[in-house]
């Protein structure tokens, strides 16, 4: 994958060590801190022991950040995935549900929506009650009109106004973080999938098909079409790389990967011996 150098790759391998430890990609996500708990991203809680590896999460976050920061230069396929997710989340962030009670408040809020570049996509009205799905366009920068509306709606004194964004926190920074998180999870799933296939380990159905009941999924991607690292498997019949897969190259990559893992293990053993020797002295 372009933009991920040898240092980050070595650090990632040092924490994963062996993909046999993770029979499912969900366990790898959990170990690296990318699991979902009660519908929200897993976080560390003060006073409690972390249920994931904080250092491993930091390394994978750096991997994703490198892809994004160097994306305009390398044009990595995962950077293009990030842009796709960013556009999807940005479109969701532009939309909010607005519920207004009171005839005067309805008239005032509708006027504010029109003046701030809002468009009513769906609406329901009753006796002194109006509810609608509103999409706000951008004037100077993304989500600026939406933020103006959210700030202005707090100053409405007549009636009762409730605003429910489709995204919990409709800010540009949050949209970027969500797109980056999704791209990193897909990258980890692809690493897990290809690594286990190369080692001859069972893979099973992709997570999005087995657990989320999706009908399709994004297959593992490579930045070098001349040397694809992939092989045809049970759930890979639609993979565009299966017809040009080079078995010799796959074996070379597997040998290189095993050599790297062995180097990391020896380095860890040496560090333990040095620490133990220093303690004895």
Image (tube, rainbow, N blue to C red):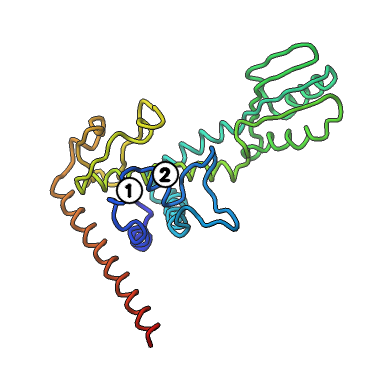
Q: Which residue is mark 2?
A: 185
Q: Quadrant of residue 152?
A: top right
Find numbered disc 1 in the image and state the secondary structure of the residue it sits on: loop
Few, some or many residues within 10 Å of mark 2 (<14, 14–19, 20+):
many
Q: Residue at x 50, y 55 (%)?
A: 50
Does 215 sit above or below residue 181? Answer: above
- Residues at circles 2 and 1 in contact by the CB criterion of under 8 Å: no
**Image x and y of residue 255, in percent:** 18, 57
Q: Is residue 50 left or right of residue 159?
A: left
Q: Which residue is mark 1?
A: 22
Find numbered disc 2 in the image and state the secondary structure of the residue it sits on: helix
**Which label sits in the foreground, 2 or 1?**
1
**Image x and y of residue 24, in percent:** 33, 42
**Image x and y of residue 97, in percent:** 66, 25
Q: Quadrant of the C terminus?
A: bottom left
Viewer-side residue, 196 vs 79: 196
* Mark closer to the chain start, 2 or 1: 1
Using the image, tell me which numbered label, if any, was put on residue 214: none
Q: Is residue 32 left or right of residue 165?
A: left
Viewer-side residue, 276 vs 19: 276
Q: Is residue 194 left or right of residue 168?
A: left
**How far apart in space, not on screen, are marks 2 and 1 (Cα)?**
15 Å
| Residue farthest along the left direction in this orientation | 248
| Residue farthest along the top direction in this orientation | 127
Few, some or many residues within 10 Å of mark 1 (<14, 14–19, 20+):
some
Q: Residue at x 36, y 25 (%)?
A: 215
Q: Residue at x 31, y 40 (%)?
A: 220
């Amino acid at each position: 994958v372009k933009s991920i150098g040898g240092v980050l790759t070595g650090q990632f391998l040092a924490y994963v060590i062996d993909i046999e430890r993770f029979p499912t990609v969900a366990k790898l996500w959990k170990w690296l801190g990318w699991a979902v708990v009660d519908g929200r991203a897993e976080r560390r809680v003060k006073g409690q022991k972390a249920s994931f590896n904080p250092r491993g999460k930091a390394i994978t976050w750096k991997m994703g950040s490198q892809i994004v920061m160097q994306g305009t230069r390398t044009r990595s396929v995962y950077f293009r995935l990030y842009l796709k997710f960013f556009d999807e989340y940005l479109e969701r962030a532009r939309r909010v549900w607005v519920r207004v009670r009171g005839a005067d408040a309805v008239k005032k809020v509708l006027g504010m929506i029109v003046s701030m570049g809002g468009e009513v996509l769906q609406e329901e009205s009753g006796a002194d009650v109006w509810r609608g799905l509103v999409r706000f366009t951008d004037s100077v920068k993304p989500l600026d009109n939406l933020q103006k509306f959210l700030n202005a709606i707090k100053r409405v004194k007549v009636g009762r106004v409730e605003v429910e964004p489709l995204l919990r926190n409709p800010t540009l920074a949050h949209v970027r973080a969500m797109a980056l998180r999704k791209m990193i999870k897909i990258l980890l799933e692809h690493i897990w999938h290809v690594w286990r296939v190369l080692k001859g380990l069972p893979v099973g159905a992709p997570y999005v098909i087995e657990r989320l009941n999706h009908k399709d999924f994004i297959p593992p991607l490579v930045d070098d079409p001349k040397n694809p690292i992939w092989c045809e498997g049970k759930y890979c019949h639609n993979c565009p790389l299966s017809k040009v897969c080079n078995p010799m190259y796959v074996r070379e990559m597997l040998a290189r990967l095993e050599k790297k893992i062995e180097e990391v293990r020896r380095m860890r053993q040496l560090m333990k011996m040095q620490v133990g020797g220093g303690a004895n002295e």
